Amino acid sequence: MQKLNQMNEFSQAQVEQLIQIAQTNNQVWWIMGDADVLAFYLKLRDEHSNNLSVESLKALIELVSEYEKSEAKEPDDDIPF
């Protein structure tokens, strides 16, 4: 992930392939909640949403939305037991 984060530009085809990888590769999907992975995909969404196909944009939004919401939540100070 570190090497991908160092790259400044991706083509539309590369971004769409990165989205497809996240959808089909369980390892990437499982670590989507990791801060660096989520930040990478959020950056792709923010920088490339105007250039993506409708299907890819929808998939990307679905991939990051659950984790993005949990990132925005405040930590729960209540102890459940």
Image (tube, rainbow, N blue to C red):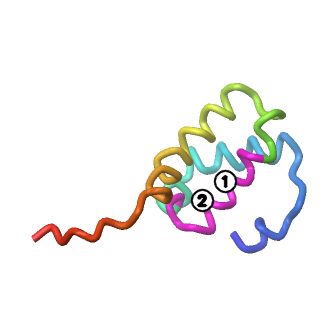
> Which quarter of the figure is the C terminus placed in?
bottom left
Residue to which mark 1 is pinned: 41
Q: Which amino acid does label 2 sit on?
A: Leu
Q: Where is residue 57 in the image (x, y as percent from the top left)?
A: 68, 34
As for residue 42 lying within the magenta part, the answer is: yes
Q: Residue at x 77, y 65 (%)?
A: 4
In this view, the residue in front, 79 or 53, is: 79
Q: Which amino acid does label 1 sit on?
A: Tyr
Is residue 76 rendered to the left or right of residue 16?
Answer: left
Q: Is residue 80 above or below residue 12?
A: below
Q: In this view, does 68 lie above or below 4?
A: above
Q: In this view, does 43 lie above or below 57?
A: below
Which of the 4 quarters of the picture holds residue 12?
Answer: top right
Which residue range is magenta in the image?
32-46
* Secondary structure mainly formed by the magenta segment: helix
Is residue 7 rendered to the left or right of residue 31?
Answer: right
Pointers 2 and 1 in contact (C-beta within 8 Å): yes
Q: Where is residue 60 in the image (x, y as percent from the top left)?
A: 63, 41
Q: Where is residue 54 in the image (x, y as percent from the top left)?
A: 70, 25
Secondary structure state at the residue bearing disc 1: helix
Dot 1 surroundings within 10 Å: few (below 14), some, or many (20 or more)?
Answer: many
Q: Which residue is drawn at 62% across and 31% down?
A: 58
Is residue 7 rendered to the left or right of residue 53?
Answer: right
Q: Which residue is drawn at 43% across and 57% down?
A: 73
Query: How far is mark 2 from mark 1, CA to CA?
Result: 5 Å
Residue to which mark 2 is pinned: 38
Give the residue at the far top of this rendering. 54
Q: In this view, does 73 lie above or below 19?
A: below
Dot 2 surroundings within 10 Å: few (below 14), some, or many (20 or more)?
Answer: some
